[in-house]
Amino acid sequence: MSSLPTSGNVPHVELRSLDELWFQVSGTLCNLECTHCFISCSPHNDSFSYLSLETVAKSLEESIRWGVKEYYFTGGEPFLNREIVPILERTLEYGPVTVLTNGTVLKAEWLSRLRDAEQRGSYSLEFRVSIDGPTPATNDPIRGPRTFERAMKGVRLLVEHGFLPIITMARTWDLSEDERILEEFRGVLKEQSCDRPRLKVLPRLQIGAEADRSEGYGQHDRITPEMMQEFDESQLICNHSRVVTDRGVYVCPILLDAPDARLGETLEAAAVDFPLSHGACYTCYQYGAICTNLSAAKSSTT
Amino acid sequence: MKLAIFGGIYNNYLALEAAIADARARGVDDFYCLGDLGAFGPHPDRVFPLLKEAGVVCIQGNYDDSIGNDLDDCQCGYTDPRDNHFAQISYEYTYRNTAPENRRWMRDLLTELRLEVDGIRFLLCHGSPRQTNEFLWDSTTSTHFLDKLARDHNADVVLATHTGIHWQRELSEGRRFVNVGVLGRPENDGSTNVWYTIIRTGNDLPKPTGSAPWDSTVNNTPIQIEFIPLAYNHERLAQEMQDEGLPEEFINTIRTGWWTTCLEVLPSRERRAGKW
């Protein structure tokens, strides 16, 4: 059995290339208060706040030199940020964009503008909508009353504007149930005129609110140096991403609450090795590519 | 110089035969293939004599690495269960029907090739210069990413395949990234033809006008990149796939030009261009 890493033998991961630049565009502010949120977002959690268009624009300029391939926007709920539409419009001039939303606050006028912005350029604008299962019975206890209905309305609105949303769901069921749940969800989405359902199941991250809901990581849920031998590091997001927040640049969108996750003020300062000392690193190791889209999934070759 | 660059062949020996004849008729000097000789289609062993007879210089794709090294799957990079289910069917069929000497030949192929033609530095790879099975889609790859890739790998023109859809981007200082398309199956556009690429370089080319997107100069040498749609006997291929017991979904793609599998890996823009 592998030994538990101590501070002396925690494996470190280098930033191989900055392929994805994330923006914590609405900080930890969200209109919902999901019981499994790994950074405990809520209407009152302002430990991270909104990014301005000016801040995003500065990072976009900085990103050119790094050869960033894709841009991701998350929160909290990105569409609570009053500048989100101009921010996304500006970013589409630089590269492909993915927005992670709960789908409950989308407005037709915003989506019309964004659809126009996407069509003006050559890059994809992807929407990832979080809905935790194919029914209100699986979703609402986690995400809040009537959130299934409201998010599905958001999905319909996206489809009406010509987008093909990716539905992401955190696995609050047994792994063996995945295929049945995906099939059921495909059926539900087709009934809602979403005839090309794109679905992605995500593992739960047992930190933040989720640690209170179920259980946190055990002391053995850590990556050991032995586990990194012959492991493809590109499966770990810290190998190819960084996150811009209003409090500096962080290693990944998952570990915002971890004291060592803030790497510096600029991308330059944040281009340092990161020690894989967290339980969430173990989940990232187990499942791989949990934050990126399927079209950008890294798959190792031998 | 006039070069023909073929992308993934996917066992489609009928398209390969047609492409070689088409390129010869256009006066091509040299032939290259960017890998993934197997997959999808029927009769894997029929591809190899054609490649050898025409002197097609091949590099190794993820499929060739897998078949050549007796791996369990094709390393195509799919993450969706349905995509992987169909990928596995064609992988097992291809592995079973590829002669040991052809497997060995694939095992020993190089994973990249560098050419200098008329002063232009070409880098031939399968997915990207840094990872054999990396998907570089037109709509999800920024220009500055490609610029850095070309610079980091000391190339003026990077040639790749892997995604199954041709596209190109002009980069800074005349550099280029070109996805040459594939011969193996149509491009999810409702047409049954497949695609390959012809590259012309040198001073015998007409002066660049700037009016056509493929006219420019690299290191003061004119270059022209032309994507060639290629008709072939797709009905015969579909019939042979049927006779071999390959999935109806694959045959449908050959007959209609619409992808029915490997859809989840498509970005939304490329997905919307298709039917399913």
Image: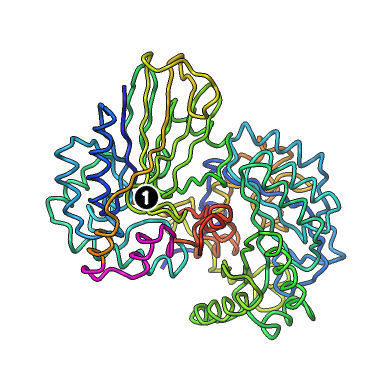
The quadrant in which the N terminus of chain B is found is top left
Q: In the picture provided, is B60 more to the left or to the right than A34?
A: left
In which quarter of the view is residue B96 placed?
A: bottom left
Q: Is residue B10 visible?
A: yes
- Picture colour scheme: rainbow
Is residue B59 or residue A29 the one in the foreground?
B59
Q: In the picture provided, is B61 more to the left or to the right than A171?
A: left
State the image coordinates of residue A182 (x, y, percent, origin top left): 54, 76
Is residue B136 or residue B215 the one in the foreground?
B215
Residue at the bottom extreme? A137
At 29% from the left and 44% from the top, the residue drawn is B60
Q: Is residue A199 visible?
A: no
At 64% from the left and 63% from the top, the residue drawn is A165
Q: In the picture provided, is B101 more to the left or to the right than B231?
A: left
Determine if the magenta segment contains residue A141.
Answer: no
- The amino acid pointed to by label 1 is Asn
Determine if the magenta segment contains residue B258.
Answer: yes
Disc 1 crowd rating (10 Å Cα; few below 14, some 14-19, many 20+) is many
Instruction: Name above or below for residue B82 compared with residue B50.
Output: below
SS at circle 1:
loop
In which quarter of the view is residue B180 placed?
A: top left
- For label 1, the residue is B193
At 55% from the left and 22% from the top, the residue drawn is B210
What is the chain identity of the residue bearing mark 1?
B
Is residue B153 or residue A152 the one in the foreground?
A152
State the image coordinates of residue B242 (x, y, percent, origin top left): 25, 68
State the image coordinates of residue A16 (x, y, percent, origin top left): 52, 42
Is residue A49 or residue B79 the one in the foreground?
B79
In which quarter of the view is residue A38 placed?
A: bottom right
Magenta-highlighted residues: B242-261
State the image coordinates of residue B228 (x, y, percent, origin top left): 38, 39
